[in-house]
Amino acid sequence: MRASRICPRSVIPTLMASVLSGLVGIGSASAKPEYVWGGKLDLTRGVSTVDGSAGGGIASWALISGNETRDGIGGTANVTALRSHNFTLTSYAAGIGAWDRYEVTLGGQDFDTGRTGGRLGLGNGYTFHQDILGLKARLFGDAVYDQDHWTPQVAVGAQIKSADHKAILHALGARRASGVDYYVSATKILLDRSLLIDATIRMTEANQWGLLGFGGDRRSGYQPQFEGSIGYLVTPRLLVGAELRTKPDNLRFAREGDAADLFAAVALSKTLSATLAWAEIGDVATLRRQSGLYLSLQAGF
């Protein structure tokens, strides 16, 4: 089956129209809407993924950015650094959440190859960059308030990614320098068990989250990938857990491994949270078993 039939790019304008019409429609439902700022329980806006959306460190969740409830608008801003043995990944993003249903995020990633760039002929410290526009819409369910049944919160999303250095990416075997990821996430918070559980299916062609382009000379076309998280609320302000994210293996010059982490997220205040993790990001650009510390800071309102 052709990839375009699995994930038609017409999904993007449809999802964008849904988000925008929701923002406009709900906001204009009353001549004088009353917005409520804040109201979410600590950590229930999620932290921030490396892609910029609300979620864990590497796995997307169905939660919506910001501290807003169904009656308001909120937002987040975050910066994240992941340092492995040979590389440094820095990501940053800002997002808006509306009525705890719609999310729009805009961010970027910088992938510093360090001395490995010199060994690859690119030069020491050569840095790949990509921009990411994220859209998310909650379909049904409420991860927090639906405690009387097992229905999770379910959301669909798309991430429009555009990497630079197109000529180099093509030389490495990538088919394109830009692409779109589509995903559906289901998240459930069990307050009586202090548990958070999430499962996400992502359709993607991205190499190393898109930093090394999309599609490749080994394999091309959309492939389903899995993202999962499980967390335990030690206290209402401290969440510890683990995540897994599988990735395609599209390029001949370097195998690509899956990513996993062990994390601790703490709400320092109603507006500031921090996440510390040990991340295993698999094989990256001919180097095996890359791992290191992951630190993320997020401000939300």
Image (cartoon, rainbow, N blue to C red):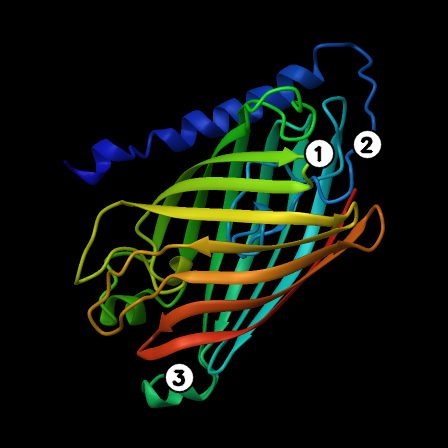
Mark in front: 3 vs 1 = 1
Which residue appears at 72% of the width and 41% of the height? Answer: 75
Could you say which is closer to the camera, residue 149 or residue 67? 149
User: Which amino acid lies under the numbered mark 2 shown in the image of this protein?
Assistant: Gly
Q: Of residues 131 and 84, which is closer to you in this image? A: 84
Q: Earlier in the sequence, mark 3 or mark 1?
A: 3
Secondary structure beneath dot 2 equals: loop
User: Which residue is painted at 39% across and 58% down in the image?
Assistant: 210
Tell me the residue at 47%/65% (across/down): 129
Q: Amino acid at mark 1?
A: Asp
Q: Foreground mark, 2 or 3?
A: 2
Say which residue label 2 marks: 39
Residue 123 visible in the displayed image: no
Q: To which quarter of the image does residue 193 belong?
A: top right
Q: Which mark is residue 192?
A: 1
**Rendered residue at 74%/27% (across/down):** 69
Badge 1 crowding class, 10 Å Cα cut-off, few under 14, some 14 to 19, many 20 or more, is: few
**From mark 2 to mark 1, how far is it between C-alphas?**
20 Å
When asked about the image quadrant of residue 146, the answer is top right
Kindly identify which numbered label has been placed on residue 50.
none
Which labelled disc corresponds to residue 117?
3
In the rendered structure, the answer to whether residue 23 lies left or right of residue 132 reads right
Q: Secondary structure at mark 3?
A: helix
Image height of 16 relative to 193, above or below: above
